[in-house]
Amino acid sequence: MSRRGTVKKRTAKSDPIYRNLLVNMFVNRILKRGKKSLAFKIIYRALFLIQQKKETNPLFVLRKAVRRVTPYVKVKARRVKKSIRLIPFQIRSKQGKVLAIRWLLEAARKRPGENMAFNLSSELMDAAKGSGGAIRKKEETHRIAEANRALAFFRR
């Protein structure tokens, strides 16, 4: 923590084609071993495939998928009276969005298929409809949080 002054809030950059922060967040999450141009190719191909299949703006599908997958609670393991319990916590919208992107990419990577762009486009379209691996992950998290709701007062 600096004593010399206040830290300027950094603004997130948007991607060059769609000029959207959400697309840039996806690119930064896809990124492996610093290959950002490959990550851009993957996300742009996925959005192009969505545009071909749906014949609508792919950003609407992307936003809808992220909105549907975004969780409202998460569970953390805490040690309570010599046993480990899963305690539910409410999360902010930014953290929820980050989790949604992570879950969408995990589900796309687990899909059997041709390539990452095709798998990602399929997962995004499924999530926008309300099905798919990422939606299952969200529902599972909410179910665990609901089951452990009685332990919510153990928060620190």
Image (cartoon, rainbow, N blue to C red):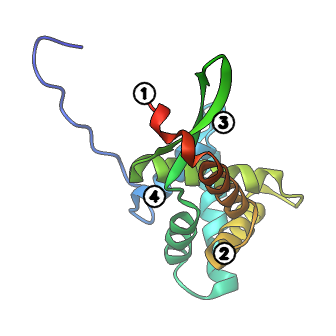
Which residue position holds label 1? 156
Q: Residue at x 45, y 32 (%)?
A: 155
Q: Amino acid at mark 3?
A: Lys
Q: Amino acid at mark 2?
A: Gly
Answer whether labels 1 and 3 touch (C-beta < 8 Å).
no
Q: In terms of sequence position, does the residue under pointer 4 or pointer 1 come before the other? A: 4
Which residue position holds label 4? 22
Secondary element under disc 2, as helix, strand or loop, is: loop
Local crowd at mark 1 within 10 Å, few (<14), some, or many (≥20)?
few
**Which one is closest to the eye, mark 4 or mark 1?**
1
**Which one is closest to the eye, mark 2 or mark 3?**
2
Q: In terms of sequence position, does the residue under pointer 3 or pointer 4 come before the other? A: 4
Residue 18 left/right relative to 27: left
Q: In terms of sequence position, does the residue under pointer 1 or pointer 3 come before the other? A: 3
Task: Give the numbered dot on residue 130.
Answer: 2
From this view, report whether residue 108 is shown above or below residue 122.
Answer: above
Camera sees residue 29: yes
Answer whether labels 3 and 4 touch (C-beta < 8 Å).
no
* Residue ranking furthest to the bottom: 55
Residue 33 percent location from the top left of the image? 65, 30
Residue 117 percent location from the top left of the image? 72, 60
Which residue position holds label 3? 32
Residue 21 percent location from the top left of the image? 40, 56
Secondary element under disc 1, as helix, strand or loop, is: loop
- The quadrant where residue 50 appears: bottom right
Residue 136 left/right relative to 115: left
Q: Amino acid at mark 4?
A: Leu
Q: In terms of sequence position, does the residue under pointer 2 or pointer 3 come before the other? A: 3
